[in-house]
Structures are given as C-alpha cells and as structure tokens.
Image (cartoon, rainbow, N blue to C red):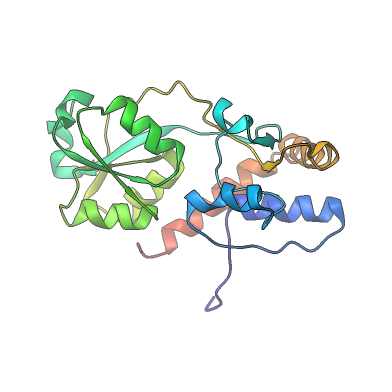
Amino acid sequence: DGKDTVVGADVEIAKAIADELGVKVKFSEMSFDNVLASVQSGKADIAISGISATKERQKTFDFSDTYYESETVLVVKKDDAGAYKQTSDFAKKSVAVQKGSIQEKIAKSNLSDANVVALSQPGEAINELKSGQVNGVVLEKAIAQGYVEQNSDLAVSDIKLKSDSNDAYAVAMPKGSDKLKAKVNKVITKLKKEGKIDSFVQDAYALSLKSPTK
C-alpha cells in the first residue's frame, strides 16, 4: 500500500503476545544470525523469526511451546530439476542458505560434499541461484513456495532433506523467563485453538506472491 510496514505470520503472533501483556510491541528488523544474539544481550525481550527450538539453543534460551511445524526443501532452476535426483548429485556444487538458520545446518548435514554458501537474506540466495552463482537454495518450505510462485524458472526439488533437529518454530526468551513464557504459551495455545496461526501463515504466503524478489 506504499507504506514501509513489517508484516508476516510471526509479526501477527508478536502483536497478539503484546496484547496479552498489555504493552506496545516494537519490531526490530535484523539479519537472522543477530536475532538470538539481541535477546542474549538484552537488546530484545523476545525473538520470533521462524526460530527452531533446537537442544543446543535451549541451553542458552527459554522457548515457548511450538507454534508451527516447518519443512526444509531445496530450490533449484526448473531446467536443472531433472539432473538432481539425490543429495550426492550436489557434490562439488554450490548451495546457498540463510546464515545462522536451521537450514544452514540441514544443508551442511545433507549436502556434505557441496559448497554451502551462507548469505544474510533468502532473497539474496534466490538471486544467486537465478544468476547461476549457486546451484540450489535450501529454504523453509513456505518461503520456498513463495519464491517459486514468483519465479517461473525455479522449482522445488524432489530431493528429501533429513533433519535431526527440532524443526518446529517457537518464541525465544532469556533464560529464567518463567512468567513471560507462561503468558506467551497462553497466547500460542489460544491462537492454535482458533486456527489463527494457519491463517497468519496463509496470509503471509499470499503477501509474498505480491512482492518482488529482493
């Protein structure tokens, strides 16, 4: 609508949490690898950015109940999709990921013989794929589908990527945030029961189809 506004499923969940707490939420955009660091340093009270509540992260942060189950996929050029049947086909190929994301770990685990290139933004990774700088991009499925819908020359590969990590998203908080965690969980339970989180994801996906690749 011509206004610079932060939108998305996580944004709507954060607004609902703020309503429950009776506070005004302030959103801070940053690269993914700085999101958790901001909570750890005290610059942010919570982090909600498609964060997987891995066992490693749980050592440093408190996490809410999970609110969304993610799936990781591999995006390739449509014309090359037939050439990639298994992960070994990416040996000595380059694959882009978002730096600091769970997808970076999944890519390194599944595509151990590939050159994994960590970039700050998914859009940057997609542009690298379209220009031929990399051969694939590892992304969360909903995000990947958005880019594929926008770019007729791209496709989601049939290759299945395995993950030993917890791919369910949760809200991250500083360790010892018992009262805050209880409030956040109350909101998540309510939103799940009302089916609103699925609606938030669908609305965000629809918006992504209207936005140009950046």
- The reply to whether residue 39 is visible in this rendering is yes
Q: Which quarter of the image is occupied by the N terminus?
A: bottom right
What x and y, as percent, mark residue 174? Answer: 71, 42
Question: Which residue in the rendered view is the most extreme toward the bottom?
Answer: 2
Left or right: 56 as drawn, with respect to 89: right
* Residue drawn 72% across the image and 52% down it: 45
* Residue drawn 64% across the image and 55% down it: 11
* Residue drawn 15% across the image and 28% down it: 89
What x and y, as percent, mark residue 52? Answer: 55, 35
Question: Which residue in the rendered view is the most extreme toward the front?
Answer: 41
Q: Which quarter of the image is occupied by the C terminus?
A: bottom left
What x and y, as percent, mark residue 117? Answer: 27, 45
What x and y, as percent, mark residue 32? Answer: 49, 51
Q: Nearer the viewer, residue 185 or 38?
A: 38
Left or right: 58 as drawn, with respect to 180: left
Image quadrant where residue 56 sits: top right
* Residue drawn 57% across the image and 55% down it: 8
